[in-house]
Amino acid sequence: MGIQSADKTSRWLPPLAIAVLATIAVAALYLGQVIFIPLALGIILSFLLQPIVRLLERGGLPRVPSVVTVVLLISIVLAGIGWSVGGQLRDLAHDLRANQTYISNLESKIFDLRRLLGSGAMADLQATLERVGTRLEEVEGDAQNKTKVNETKVLVQAERNVSTTVRQLFDSC
């Protein structure tokens, strides 16, 4: 009878050991993500950019200048994409301030989202939006000192109306 209970224990030991080792591995990966994510991205980028470097080397350019050239070209492309996206965001912010249709459309989308998600997720979203609104008002407060008083009053009043409307929308749901 003692031999049968030992067999039962030995049958469960390897799966238990695998579970413990898997847990340790997942914990190590989670704690090491600060190191592993950039390392993985670097490896992926090196594989993706290697054909371009090879092409430049076949053209007669030595290895180090080929790598530097590819890195500079990719940096310029990424900076251009960032500049373009930034411009689009700036235009969107300007359009949101200038056009009441955008604001009412956004309010209806937020209302629908709140109705679908329930109160927990929307409370977090509302807190985040309020923090962003507060920071935007602080930035606008700094901008007020640099612009004319009449223009600033109109901009601040428009933003307060929008934030008040959004808050009323959240409170009514």
Image (cartoon, rainbow, N blue to C red):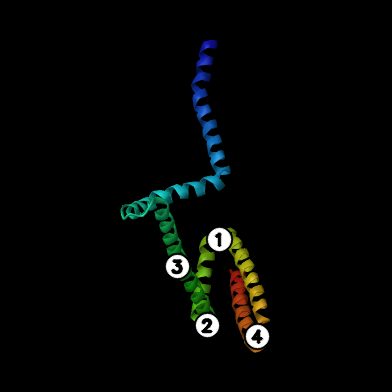
Closer to the chain start, of discs 3 and 1, is 3
Against 29, residue 49 (above or below) is below
Mark 2, mark 1: which one is toward the viewer? 2
The mark that comes first in sequence, 2 or 1, is: 2
Q: CA distance from mark 1 to mark 4?
A: 36 Å
Residue 153 image label: 4
Mark sitting on residue 118: 1
What is the CA distance from the residue labelled 2 to the residue labelled 4?
A: 15 Å
Q: In the rendering, at what x and y percent does residue 149 appear?
A: 67, 87
Circle 2 sits on which residue?
A: 98
Q: Amino acid at mark 4?
A: Lys
Residue at figure coordinates x 65%, y 85% from the top left: 153
Label 1 environment density (alpha carbons within 10 Å; few <14, some 14–19, many ≥20)? few
Mark 4 or mark 2, which is nearer the start of the sequence?
A: 2
Q: Earlier in the sequence, mark 1 or mark 4?
A: 1
Give the Cα distance between marks 3 and 4.
Answer: 35 Å
